[in-house]
């Protein structure tokens, strides 16, 4: 159980206080699911950048972080997110492990703006040299689209270079770092050159 003093501390405060990533992870792991999600979604863009840099000291993230091994294939796992952009800050990344595939996850972005900007489908996989990229061990790759079954009820798969979603997802890759047992942080690149921003994810505890 958290003490009263521990419960009063927030993730944002720990980042501002220059806390070690190990202490941040311990704090998040002690929180209940609702409080963990709330504190994650309160972290603003400037602090996200700081946390991303600090998370370089974490153990590399892997695909099982996003879809745990006990979750059946072609089952949805939701990660609640906040990005560093001025608009459309809150979203979900929804993930699944395709049946019969190793080394890949499929996913898309769910948000209020999805009818306007599209689902933003992606394929997640380890980065080059088995996850050794310094930006993050797993890449969310919008250059790639799912080519096998996705969960029932997911939106139609659309190429990211068509429609308005091309301004959000086309030629984009997100590189992921681990923060804690449920929380990860990513940096988004356009054409591998331009940093578009940062985002935090908190995995649904039911997964």
Image (cartoon, grey):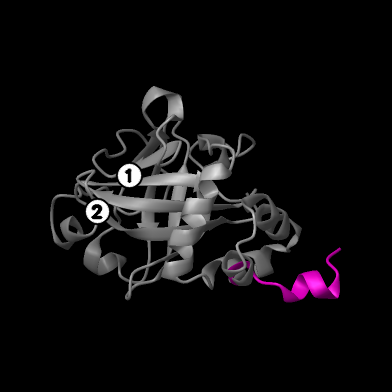
Q: Residue at x 86, y 69 (%)?
A: 3
Q: Residue at x 61, y 70 (%)?
A: 39
Q: Nearer the viewer, residue 203 or 106?
A: 203
Q: Which residue is mark 2?
A: 169
Q: Is residue 103 visible?
A: no
For numbered disc 2, what is the local secondary structure? loop
Q: Residues within 10 Å of mark 2 (few under 14, many from 20)?
A: many
Q: Which residue is mark 1?
A: 122
Q: Is residue 6 above or below residue 95?
A: below
Q: Nearer the viewer, residue 170 or 156?
A: 170
- Residue farthest toward the front in the current orientation of the protein: 18
Magenta stretch: give its range: 1-12
Q: Is residue 144 left or right of residue 21?
A: left
The residues bearing labels 2 and 1 have C-alpha atoms spaced at a distance of 9 Å
Q: Is residue 27 left or right of residue 72?
A: right
Circles 2 and 1, Cβ within 8 Å, touching? The answer is: yes
Q: Residue at x 42, y 48 (%)?
A: 152
- Indicate the position of residue 197 as horizontal and vertical percent values: 33, 60
For numbered disc 1, what is the local secondary structure? strand
Total marks placed: 2
Q: Is residue 9 above or below residue 189?
A: below
- Indicate the position of residue 79 as horizontal and vertical percent values: 51, 55
Q: Is residue 49 visible?
A: yes
Location of the N terminus (image quadrant): bottom right
């Amino acid at each position: 159980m958290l003490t009263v003093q521990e419960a009063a501390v927030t993730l944002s405060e720990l980042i501002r206080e220059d806390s070690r990533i190990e202490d941040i992870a311990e704090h998040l792991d002690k929180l209940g699911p609702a409080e963990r999600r709330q504190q994650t979604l309160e972290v603003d863009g400037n602090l996200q950048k700081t946390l991303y840099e600090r998370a370089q000291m974490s153990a590399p993230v892997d695909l099982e972080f996003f879809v745990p091994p006990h979750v059946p294939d072609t089952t949805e796992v939701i990660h609640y997110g906040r990005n560093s952009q001025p608009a459309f800050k809150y979203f979900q990344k929804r993930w699944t492990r395709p049946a019969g595939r190793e080394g890949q996850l499929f996913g898309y972005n769910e948000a209020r703006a999805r009818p306007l900007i599209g689902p933003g489908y992606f394929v997640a996989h380890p980065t080059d040299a088995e996850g050794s990229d310094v930006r993050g061990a797993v890449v969310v790759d919008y250059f790639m689209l799912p080519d096998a079954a996705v969960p029932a009820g997911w939106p139609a798969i659309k190429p990211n270079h068509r429609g308005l979603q091309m301004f959000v997802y086309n030629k984009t890759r997100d590189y992921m770092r681990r923060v804690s047992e449920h929380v990860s942080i990513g940096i988004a690149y356009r054409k591998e050159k331009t940093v578009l921003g940062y985002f935090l994810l908190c995995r649904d505890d039911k997964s």
